[in-house]
Structures are given as C-alpha cells and as structure tokens.
Amino acid sequence: MRRLFLAQTLVLTALSALTPELANAVPKPPILLIFGDSLSAEYGLVRGSGWVALLERRLQQNGRDIQVVNASISGETTAGGRSRLGGVLARVRPRWVLIELGANDALRGLALESTEHNLKAMVLAIRESGAEPILAGMMIPPNFGLSYSERFRDLFGRVAKAQKAPIVPFLLAGIADEGPMKAELFQDDRIHPNAQAQSLILDNVWAVVGPLLRSK
C-alpha cells in the first residue's frame, strides 16, 4: 500500500511539473499589429466602433483565429513610430504589421525625405523581427501645394515597391478622394472620418489584408 501511495505521489508531482510546459505548448493565435495614428486609434469615436475593431470582428465572423493588437497613437508621426516600434515588436511579437503613419508628417509640413526614410526603416525592422510588413497609403488635399501633395502620395508606393511590401493604395479611398470632400463622412474637424466611414476604411484594408491572412 505504501508503495502504491509513493507511486501515485510521484506521478502527480511529475504531472504538476509538466502542466506549465503543456500550457505554454498550446499554440497561440498569430497577431496582426496595427501601428498607426488617430485614423486607427478611434479618435473622436465610441470605443469599439473604429475600423480596427471592425476588422477584428470580421476576422472572427470569417472563422480566422487571428488576434488584432492596436498600438496606434493619436498625433503619431513616422519619426515617433520609428522610435517606439522596436519595443512594440519585442512585446507583441506579431506575424503581420500594418503601418498606418505619415498623415501627421504632412499636416506638419515635415520633410518628405524623412517620412520616406522612416517608413523604410520601419519596414526593415518589421522584417528583421520575423513579421510581414504592410503599408497603408495616404493622400492629402492639394491645398497643401500640388507638388507637395503629389510627392507625399507617391512616396508610399515607392517604399512598398522598393521593399516588396503589400500596400493598401489609399486608406481613405471613397472617403477623401481627389475632388470635393464628402463632409457627411467626417467629424466636425473635417480631418477625422466619422463612425459612418469606418466600414469603408475596413473594406479598403480588407481588400489587401484579407488575402494575406487567408494564406497563413
């Protein structure tokens, strides 16, 4: 009887020691990191109503076991994003990273060469971490100066082509295309899309990101 008790004790001890390892062995869902500014940070919106939250719901509805982590900060520039990206990558360990940055650079009239350089550096850092980078293209109204606006628009495609990274051509397609602004899709500041526009942003992102995530 004593031998049986000792044997049971040894078995239970061994199982308890293995339990943490078994828990760690359970595969975790891959992570899609959204790394952007106020356009992705639900600025002026009810929490959970922005396009990133809608993306997470669409993934669930499509049976995709993918976790979405939103590390977007209102007011972020490409320089600010570049400085904090390494820490976020180390902490989150994503499989994909969608970079949605650059609009604040243009609004502040920053040098476009710096914007392009920062985006390239972030793409490289993402690849070095083992994740796949995705760019979100952006445009600004021509009242910033036609030359500046065109150069700003073109730099996203140039970075994507040079780095062979997928790109959402224009995050706000159907919302802030060239021509008269669709005022009904913007908040009172005429800068940030409202709740009605979020599903349109999601569709723009999904057209590129959806096929990438299906191939995981």
Image (cartoon, rainbow, N blue to C red):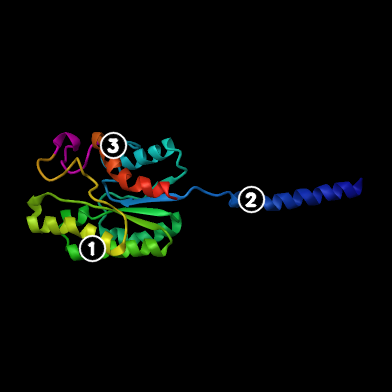
Mark 1 or mark 2, earlier in chain: 2
State the SS at label 3.
helix
Mark 3 — residue?
199
User: Is residue 121 left or right of 189 when viewed as pictured?
Assistant: right
Mark 3 or mark 1, earlier in chain: 1
**Residue that appears at 24% across and 50% down:** 169
Quadrant of the image occupied by residue 126: bottom left
- The numbered dot on residue 9 is none
Q: Is residue 60 above or below residue 17?
A: above
Whether 183 is among the magenta residues is yes
CA gap, disc 3 to disc 1?
28 Å
Q: Position of residue 202 (x, y in %)?
A: 30, 41
Q: Amino acid at mark 2?
A: Leu
CA gap, disc 1 to disc 2?
45 Å
Q: Is residue 151 above or below residue 22?
A: below
Q: Position of residue 25 (x, y in %)?
A: 60, 52
Near mark 2 (Cα within 10 A), the count class, few <14, some 14-19 or many ≥20, is: few
The magenta region covers 182-194
Near mark 1 (Cα within 10 A), the count class, few <14, some 14-19 or many ≥20, is: some
Q: Amino acid at mark 3?
A: Ser
- The numbered dot on residue 116 is 1
